Amino acid sequence: MNTSSSPGPALSACIIAFNEADRIGDCLASLAFCDEIVVVDSGSTDATADIARAAGARVLQRKFDGFRSQKAFAVAQATHDWVLCLDADERVGEALRASIEAARATGFGDAAGYRFARLDNYFGRFLRHGNAYPDHVLRLFDRRCGGWRGDREVHEAASVDGPVRTLAGDLVHFPYRSLEQQLAKTQRYARMMAEHDFARGKRATLGKLVLSPAWRFWRGWLLRGGFLDGWHGLVYAYVRANYVRQKTIMLWLLQNGQAVATPPAPGAADD
């Protein structure tokens, strides 16, 4: 479905989603300038898929087997070679939309991809300092030049072969519904990264356990000005430092043959 009257190459928006009925509507609305919206849903039990279809998106169902794999699948299903990739908790800000449309009007120039800043809303306040911002991400690219490559399924990043330009404006991000959700999410990511690092031969040390979380905190909160975001910046810095601590402890457990997750109960159904 073509919803765009913008000049330049046709553009597909690609989104992955799971139980995002409360957030995906705003995400889709911010992509009205795209020629096509593809949503890959991993079995949502809420109205995510219905909301996406009502907004004119093409909805595909795929069992989740990793963030990178899910995003790569979405890009492969797009009709057009230039793709803009978002998560359902993100939306294109007005300034960023203007920058994308200006680049598109030039045929995207000689670039193979574009990066831009991501702006996090952290429990009611936008974080503009510390490790949180500008957090440049490559999300607009010509899929013929690259995409979601590599074998890391968490903290995944797109890459392209060719010039990458930076666009003005922010990708606005609403990552957490609650602190409880953030803590659960960071623990899950810590386990996935520990498993990834262990498989690649990395090992935890006492020095890393003591120093790495401290460095993450002081680098973000003090050296990069996270303290300028007040209490929000302080809490964010503490939680991110704890993520590093969890990841290192889980890596140590793995290298000593210990479990990092509760095994499924005998006879439990496989989801």
Image (tube, helix red, strand yellow):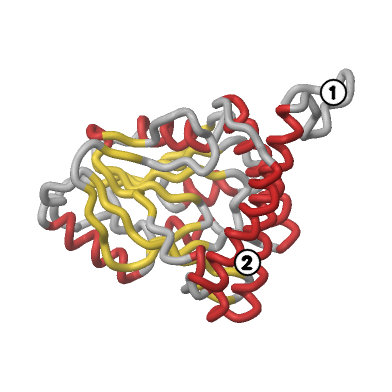
- In the displayed image of the protein, which residue is found farthest to the top? 267
> Which residue does the image show at 53% across and 81% down from the upper left?
228
For discs 2 and 1, the disc positioned in front in the rendered view: 2
Secondary structure at badge 1 equals loop
Secondary structure at badge 2 equals helix
Front residue (pair 110, 204): 204
Residue type at mark 2 is Tyr
- In the displayed image of the protein, which residue is found farthest to the right? 266
Would residue 270 appear left or right of 224 to someone viewing this image? right
Would residue 64 appear left or right of 206 to someone viewing this image? left
Horizontal and vertical percent for residue 137? Answer: 38, 53
- Asked if one can make out residue 63 in the rendered structure from this viewpoint, the answer is yes
Choose the circle earlier in sequence order: 2 or 1.
Answer: 2
Horizontal and vertical percent for residue 224? Answer: 48, 70
Horizontal and vertical percent for residue 204? Answer: 66, 37
Front residue (pair 241, 35): 241
> Which residue does the image show at 30% across and 49% down from the upper left?
140
> Which residue does the image show at 23% across and 49% down from the upper left?
164
Q: Quadrant of the C terminus?
A: top right
Residue type at mark 1 is Ala
Is residue 68 placed above or below 37 in the rendered structure? above
Crowding near the residue tagged with mark 1, few <14, some 14–19, many ≥20 C-alpha atoms within 10 Å:
few
Q: Quadrant of the N terminus?
A: top left
Is residue 68 placed above or below 175 in the rendered structure? above
Front residue (pair 6, 268): 268
Is residue 266 placed above or below 224 in the rendered structure? above
- Asked if one can make out residue 1 in the rendered structure from this viewpoint, the answer is no
Crowding near the residue tagged with mark 2, few <14, some 14–19, many ≥20 C-alpha atoms within 10 Å:
many
Horizontal and vertical percent for residue 251? Answer: 68, 35
> Which numbered marker is on residue 268?
1
Is residue 23 placed above or below 259 in the rendered structure? below
- Write down the residue under mark 2: 236
